[in-house]
Amino acid sequence: MSETEQGVEGNLATIVESGSSNTCGYQVVIHNDGSATEVIRGKMDAIVARRKFPPGTIDTKTLLSLLTEIGDVSTIPTGFCVKPVSFATTTTISYAGKTSGDLQSIPQYASGGDQALLQASKDLDRFVQTTLSQLRTNDMRLHFDAEQLKPQAA
């Protein structure tokens, strides 16, 4: 198993943002020591870039607190979200063997649901978006153009 695989000892959570027709998809594996590994994928799921961040880069104390409060991330409430077809992406997080729905689609209000879970989910989404922004993941993945993402002949 590689260090980016979910379930490897030392990995706390994995954030995945899908690609769109105009951007590469990527995953960020957050390790318990606050280090992280980012993998950007191009066409045919080929790895086009890999970056490592040192211990302490991610605030794992806050992340673990949010994940513990939520428990099963697959219960994070998500709803319908209108997105443009060619630019739409989804952002999910995996923790303790479970994967959330699209964090970009968390509703504003709980309709008969658990208000505490909804608020914790919104807090987790904010944490994820802030973390990805600090790592500058969008800057990296937009750097690759279509020519660079074509699979290479062996």
Image (tube, rainbow, N blue to C red):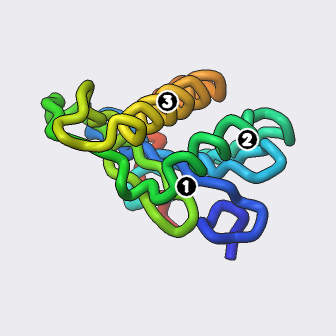
Place of residue 79 in the rendered image (x, y in percent of width and height, measured from the top left): 19, 40
Residue 69 visible in the current orientation = yes
Q: In which quarter of the image is the N terminus?
A: bottom right
The residue tagged 2 is: 60
Residue 39 visible in the current orientation = no
Residue in view at x 57 percent, y 53 percent: 14
Q: Give residue 76's mark.
A: none
Tell me which label, 3 or 1, sits earlier in the chain.
1
**Up/down of 31 relative to 58, above or below:** below
The residue tagged 1 is: 47
The residue tagged 3 is: 123
Tell me which label, 3 or 2, sits earlier in the chain.
2
- Say what amino acid the circle numbered 1 marks: Ile
State the image quarter where residue 73 is shown. Answer: bottom left
State the image quarter where residue 115 is shown. Answer: top left
Q: Is residue 62 left or right of residue 100?
A: right
| Nearest to the observer: residue 75 or residue 113 | 113
Residue in view at x 65 percent, y 61 percent: 4
How far separated are the C-alphas under marks 1 and 2? Answer: 26 Å
How far separated are the C-alphas under marks 3 and 2? Answer: 14 Å
- Say what amino acid the circle numbered 3 marks: Asp
